[in-house]
Image (cartoon, grey):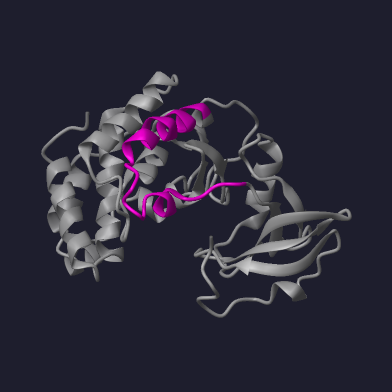
Amino acid sequence: MHPEKWRETADPFHLPMRQFRLLEVLGYPHAGNDVFHVRGEMQGAAAEAYIKAARHSEANLRHEAKMLRLLRMPDIPQVLECDEDRFSWCVTAALPGRRLSVILCGGEEESLPYMEKWGARMARLHGMRGDFPAAPHRRFMDAPPEEYCRRHGLEDIRRWLLENPISDGEKCLCHGDGHYANVLWENGEISALVDWELAGLGDREFDLAWAMIRRPGQRFMNTEAEYRLFLSGYEKAGGAFDSVRLRWYMVCAWAWFCGIGAEDADYAAWVRRALEMLTVKTLP
């Protein structure tokens, strides 16, 4: 389910866990922090879990643990144990399911049946009420700087972003990083939403754009039919969005990914075509 060790990491067996007893590392998911899929024991019972250890100064496991403790739902992981002093690591219960990138990799299934359900789940999330903290601000919410755009030939895109500013929108509960890698599926249904480090009260249109944009290596979310179904599912489940703001955030995010995916010529060319379309055409 997860790859073998692909980079040097912290040693999870050296973490001072007192409640969760680590027995075996099952895999090493790709992530910004050090994440381990593990098998162990919790209160004497066998348990599968994920251990996340902070790898960089921007990691905010304190915020993630707080959000998970506020969001007690069947498809959201439960905190089993964490470093309550420095919040340098956290253990969460593993939930069943696979990423769409795994499910669709063989080419035997189509992405379309998943889109409406994904959009509907986002709408239900955005509709939740509670005393939630603010979502962290991310650089992807802002137009890339001038030097970056000049380096990647995006001067026209930056100009479009600056000439078409958007006003602040109504805040709602957002996942903050709800792209395909953090959504798990089982039997055609969403079984888990993971990685809540960037969650909180934020901008719904950015949350939608972040879920919808295609990333390097991604073989789905690359057709208008998929976007239409995703947004249809969102609206059918009671979600409402501003298409102008959504369009702006999609242009902004893809401008950033032009640089992130620059080494993949096919992907970079595809993103540039998408940017050209979005800056002259409205979303459905």
The residue closer to the viewer here, 170 or 119, is 119
Q: Is residue 185 magenta?
A: no
Q: Is residue 78 left or right of residue 16?
A: left
Residue 159 in the image: state x and y as whole percent. 16, 50
On whether residue 115 falls in the magenta region, the answer is yes
Tally of marks? 0
Which residue occupies 22% across, 60% down?
A: 267
Q: Is residue 83 left or right of residue 266?
A: right
Where is residue 40 shown, x and y percent of the image?
Answer: 77, 62
In front: 60, or 270? 270
Percent across and percent down for residue 108 are 33, 48
Looking at the rendering, in which quadrant would you find the C terminus? Answer: top left
Task: Tell me where the magenta segment starts and ends, as one range.
Answer: 96-124
* Residue 94 image position (x, y, % from top left): 66, 51
What residue appears at the point 55 percent right and 44 percent down from the top-left corner?
A: 199
Which of the 4 quarters of the picture holds residue 73?
A: top right
Residue that protrudes farthest toward the bottom in the picture: 8
Residue 123 falls left or right of residue 130: left
The correct choice, above or below, for 262 with respect to 109 in the image is below
Residue, far right: 44
